[in-house]
């Protein structure tokens, strides 16, 4: 990449981790990048991070991202239970559960993805994009680089066993958080110079009041542990600079409460503001020290 002054500019990747609804805080990062006219060369997303990274890559504006999220949550997209699957837990008559099912019906989630991402394909997006998923039959992480964007986003965020797997690339795929909640190693493999990674860890609920609260607590525990180990490895391997943006979530946030959206975006703004100068300095330093084109 080069600018109008014939300077060598860094190749920049943005990595958005998993985190349920919390990755909506990444809207603040995209706002900043647009205001500063900073181009992205590679977008990597996992789970909730895939949703907002893909919206940005589709050209949605921040207000549109917010409205789409609000509409889905108000439609109670996380309360459409598959009662035959629930009955199967107690081995009651009529119960059925197999690899193609989840405890929630996935119709609404898939329909929302198709409405938002239309018929776009991952490989045809303006910014190179890879979506982190997990192969449920092998446990291996799998990066989607082609195919239906709508199905890819669903796969990356399909929190099994709540949401059913989806069959893509000859695999049954579920939430990427099970294998790599912060897919930062791919940014290193792709030889990007500056990696801007946004992580969305939050405190667990000390007194979970429902099955879902307890389920989400377990997810928070293992994703935070995986994120820390993968980030430590990335810092040791990367050749230039990794900038971490870590919004401070001082309380647990429900995965399905639209009233949290504005607060989460404000928390994202604070976190991006803290790292703003570091991002700009890293780009400037690279350009000053790289040989001119």
Image (cartoon, grey):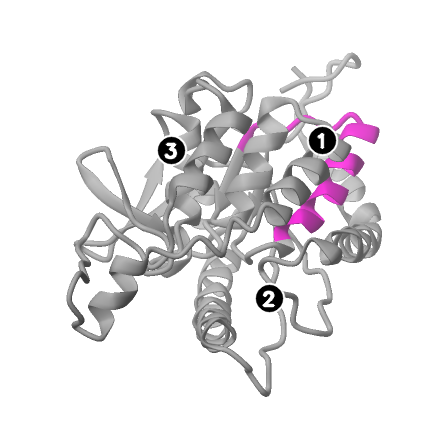
Q: Is residue 28 visible?
A: yes
Q: Using the numbered discs, state the Cα–Cα distance from disc 2 to disc 1 in whole angstroms.
A: 25 Å
Quarter where residue 43 is shown = top right
Quarter where residue 230 is shown = bottom left
User: Which quadrant: the C terminus?
Assistant: top right
Q: Are marks 2 and 1 in contact (CB under 8 Å)?
A: no
Q: Is residue 193 visible?
A: no
Q: Residue at x 26, y 60 (%)?
A: 85
* Placement of 118 over or under 31, stated as above or below: above
Assign a secondary structure to mark 3.
Answer: helix
User: Which quadrant: the N terminus?
Assistant: top right
* Placement of 228 over or under 83, stated as above or below: below
Task: Give, as a single range, the part of the protein colored magenta.
Answer: 23-42
Q: Which residue corresponds to mark 2?
A: 201
Q: Which residue corresponds to mark 1?
A: 64
Assign a secondary structure to mark 1.
Answer: helix
Q: Nearer the viewer, mark 2 or mark 1?
A: 1
Q: Are marks 1 and 3 in contact (CB under 8 Å)?
A: no
Q: Which mark is residue 76?
A: none
Q: Is residue 155 magenta?
A: no
Q: Which residue corresponds to mark 3?
A: 151
35 lies left or right of 159? right
Please identify the residue farthest to the front as the structure is shown: 93
- Residues 75 and 160: in front is 75
* Placement of 141 over or under 10, stated as above or below: below
* Placement of 219 over or under 154, stated as above or below: below
Assign a secondary structure to mark 2.
Answer: loop
Mark positioned earlier in the residue sequence (2 or 1): 1
Mark positioned earlier in the residue sequence (2 or 3): 3
Q: Using the numbered discs, state the Cα–Cα distance from disc 1 to disc 3 in whole angstroms.
A: 20 Å
Q: How many residues crowd mark 1 within 10 Å: few (<14), some (14–19), many (20+)?
A: few
């Amino acid at each position: 990449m080069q600018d109008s002054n014939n300077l060598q500019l860094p190749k920049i990747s943005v990595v958005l981790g998993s985190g349920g609804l919390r990755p909506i805080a990444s809207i603040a990062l995209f706002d900043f990048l647009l205001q500063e006219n900073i181009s992205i060369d590679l977008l990597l997303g996992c789970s909730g991070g895939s949703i907002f990274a893909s919206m940005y890559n589709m050209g949605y504006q921040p207000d549109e991202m917010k409205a789409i999220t609000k509409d889905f949550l108000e439609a109670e997209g996380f309360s459409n239970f598959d009662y035959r699957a629930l009955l199967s837990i107690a081995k009651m008559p009529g119960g059925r559960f197999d690899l193609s099912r989840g405890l929630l019906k996935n119709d609404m989630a898939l329909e929302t993805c198709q409405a938002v991402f239309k018929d776009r394909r991952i490989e045809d997006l303006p910014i190179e994009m890879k979506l982190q998923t997990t192969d449920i039959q092998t446990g291996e992480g799998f990066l989607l680089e082609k195919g239906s964007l709508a199905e890819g986003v669903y796969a990356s965020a399909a929190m099994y066993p709540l949401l059913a797997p989806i069959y893509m690339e000859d695999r049954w795929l579920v939430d990427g958080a099970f294998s790599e909640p912060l897919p930062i190693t791919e940014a290193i493999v792709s030889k990007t110079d500056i990696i801007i990674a946004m992580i969305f860890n939050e405190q667990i609920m000390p007194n979970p009041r429902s099955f879902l609260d307890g389920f989400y607590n377990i997810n928070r525990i293992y994703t935070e542990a995986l994120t820390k180990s993968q980030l430590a490895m990335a810092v040791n391997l990367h050749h230039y600079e990794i900038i971490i943006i870590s919004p401070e979530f001082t309380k647990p946030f429900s995965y399905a409460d639209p009233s949290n959206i504005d607060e989460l975006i404000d928390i994202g703004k604070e976190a991006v503001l803290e790292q703003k100068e570091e991002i700009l300095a890293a780009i400037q330093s690279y350009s000053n020290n790289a040989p001119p084109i």
